[in-house]
Image (spheres, grey):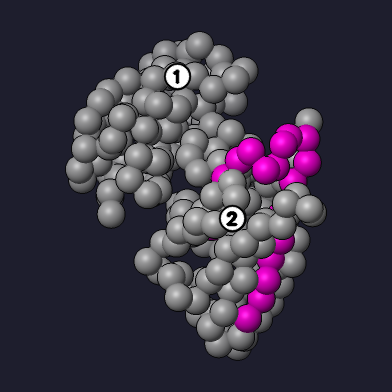
Amino acid sequence: EVQLLESGGGLVQPGESIRISCAASGFNFGDFAMSWVRQAPGTGLEWVSSVSRSGGDTYYAASVKGRFTISRDTSRDTVYLQMNRLRVEDTAVYFCAKGEGPHDFWGQGTLVIVSS
Amino acid sequence: EVVLTQSPGTLSLSPGVRATLSCRASQTVPANYLGWYQQKPGQAPRLLIYDASTRATAIPDRFSGSGSGTDFTLTISRLEPEDFAVYYCQQYGNSLSFGGGTKVEIK
């Protein structure tokens, strides 16, 4: 059974940093790109970032480029999102998703709140 | 960036009727790499359709996708009670982007 389990969310102040993680199981992690998608409260889905199977290629939405860094650790079957210089508008549930579109499996999300 | 515009924003319908949701792209979606997702409150999205018209695993055949180029449609042939939810389109042919969503609510 495919499972994606996000962790690491919480409350941070504007300008601070946080790293969230997504532990994958039930499939050959190294065979798939991985993505992060976020959803601000009461709004729609926004693609944030994707990483290739090897980890050598990374892609970012314009809204986070230069502040967020995606990475993966194949030995741990885990994908990470390092979020720096956080803004209030980064407040959202962050979902981990298998693949770089279409996403056939999603985690349940981790909530990041940016507030003073 | 490919901007996806979904319409209508809200669809108020009764169970048993047909639902037609639209997704229009600001430019041609390469290879018709367009998907549809269903999301219920407090849940992660669920993939329904990919490559514009292919049903994902275990998706009932009352869900169908059509379209090409810049205009795409999700049709639910007969609404079941569990189909009332928010639906999003996503293109993955030119980077990735999502539409703003269509809420299908009970009339």
Gap between marks 2 and 1 measured at Cα:
29 Å
Any mark on residue B54, and which? 1
Task: Rate crowding at label 2 as few (under 14), some (14 to 19) or many (20 or more) other CA atoms within 10 Å.
Answer: some
Q: Is residue A85 visible?
A: yes
Q: Is residue A59 magenta?
A: no
- Residue B20 visible, this orientation: no
Residue matched to label 2: A55
Q: Is residue A47 left or right of residue A111?
A: left
Q: Residue A102: percent from the left, percent from the top?
A: 49, 36
Q: Position of residue A65 (x, y in %)?
A: 43, 70
Question: Which residue is found at the position 59% from the left and 26% from the top?
Answer: B82
At label 2, the amino acid type is Gly
Tell me the quadrant of the picture where the N terminus of chain B can be found: bottom left
Q: Quadrant of residue B107?
A: top left
Circle 1 packing at 10 Å, graded few (<14), some (14-19), many (20+), is some
- As rendered, which of A79 and A95 lies closer to the eye? A79
Q: Are marks 2 and 1 on the same chain?
A: no
Point out residue A64 in the picture as x, y percentages from the top left corner.
45, 70
Q: Chain of mark 1?
A: B
Task: Give the secondary structure at mark 1.
Answer: strand
Q: Is residue A18 above or below residue A58?
A: below
Q: Identity of the amino acid at label 1?
A: Thr
Tell me the residue at 45%/19% (across/down): B54
Q: For residue A26: magenta?
A: yes
Left or right position of A73 against A40: right
Residue at 48 percent of width and 30 percent of height: B106
Total tally of numbered discs in the picture: 2
Subunit bearing disc 2: A
Q: Position of residue A51 (x, y in %)?
A: 54, 54
Q: Residue at x 41, y 62 (%)?
A: A61
Q: Viewed as shown, does residue A77 lie left or right of B18?
A: right
Tell me the magenta residue range: A17-38
